[in-house]
Amino acid sequence: MSKTEIRTPSGVAVSEIILSIFRINGRLLAAGDRLVAGLGLTSARWQVLGAIALSPVAEPVARLARNMGLNRQGVQRIVNELEAEGFVELKDNPHHRSARLVVLTAKGTEAHDAALRAQVPWVNMLGEGFDAKAIEAAGEVLDRLRERLEHSADEA
């Protein structure tokens, strides 16, 4: 076995955290779907609404997708659904004729706010018994892994 085929202790730990992320992803999506189903949302729709709501300025679909780490086509499909149901509207972009800006409507803002209210007891339950500093440290590790993945994708 060559040196490149032997995982370092950090490499083993990263492999384990990747497997944990894969396992938890489906469960988070299913739980999110249940949490927001009554609002006419899914986890994917909620994620896109959140990206729009949290953005300091209105953004086109391509930039929203890039900020979320998702592909443009998938986000475009969700934006189209949200627009058809009145959660978002597309406005002219003064900087680009064809890349319209995605903006929450009053219905979209209400749905996003209601989803956040529904999330409070759920995240409190998930965090129960954990030290907040440990959770923050885990978040920092995940952020650094994301940054490395983004950097390595930029170099490829």
Image (cartoon, rainbow, N blue to C red):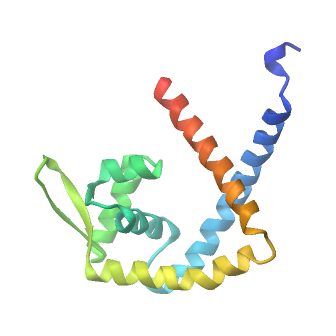
Quarter assignment of residue 15: top right
Query: Residue at the location (76% across, 61% down)?
Result: 134
Query: Residue at the location (55% across, 29% down)?
Result: 152
Q: Position of residue 42 (x, y in %)?
A: 49, 72
Residue at the far right in the pictured view: 1
Left or right of 43 on screen, residue 25 = right
Quarter assignment of residue 118: bottom right
Left or right of 94 on screen, residue 114 = right
Query: Residue at the location (71% across, 55% down)?
Result: 137
Left or right of 74 on screen, residue 17 = right
Count of residue discs: 0
Reply above or below: 103 against 41.
Answer: above
Residue at the far top in the pictured view: 2
Q: Position of residue 6 (x, y in %)?
A: 85, 23
Q: Position of residue 143 (x, y in %)?
A: 60, 48
Reply above or below: 103 against 120.
Answer: above
Image quadrant holding the N terminus, namely top right
Reply above or below: 74 against 78.
Answer: above
Query: Residue at the location (27% across, 60% down)?
Result: 57
Between 71 and 96, the one lying in front of the other is 96
Q: Position of residue 40 (x, y in %)?
A: 43, 81
